[in-house]
Image (tube, rainbow, N blue to C red):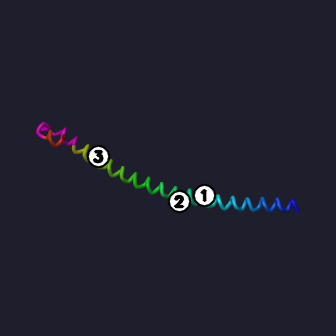
Amino acid sequence: MLFLAVFLGFLVENFREHRAEKEREKVFMESMIDDLKTDTANITSMISGSEQVLIMADSLIHLLRNPACDKYGHNMY
């Protein structure tokens, strides 16, 4: 009888632990999805900013290569 009580207690504890692990897994997966959405938005923003920097750098190089670059000093600034 004692063996049966200990064995059933063990089974119930394992069942509760399994249920808690499933719930924890669900919370971690939701957190990971939110993090991925945030990271994706940040990367998209960084790519857009990098493209703007490249465009401005290209314009600066064009102005510096121009023989009359003194005339375009205010544009370079």
- In which quarter of the view is residue 44 placed? bottom left
Q: Are marks 3 and 1 in contact (CB under 8 Å)?
A: no
Q: Which residue corresponds to the image point at 25% horizontal and 45% vertical from the top-left?
A: 56
Q: Which residues are magenta?
A: 60-71
What is the C-alpha distance between the residues marked 2 and 1?
A: 10 Å
- In which quarter of the view is residue 57 placed? top left
Q: Position of residue 17 (x, y in %)?
A: 69, 58
Q: Secondary structure at mark 3?
A: helix
Sequence-first tag of 3 and 1: 1
Q: Which residue is mark 2?
A: 30
Left or right, 64 with reference to 30: left
Q: Which residue is mark 1?
A: 24
17 inside magenta stretch: no
Q: For residue 54, which numbered disc appears in the image?
A: 3
Residue 11's place in the image compared with 69, above or below, is below
70 inside magenta stretch: yes
Q: Residues within 10 Å of mark 3 (few under 14, many from 20)?
A: few
Sequence-first tag of 2 and 1: 1
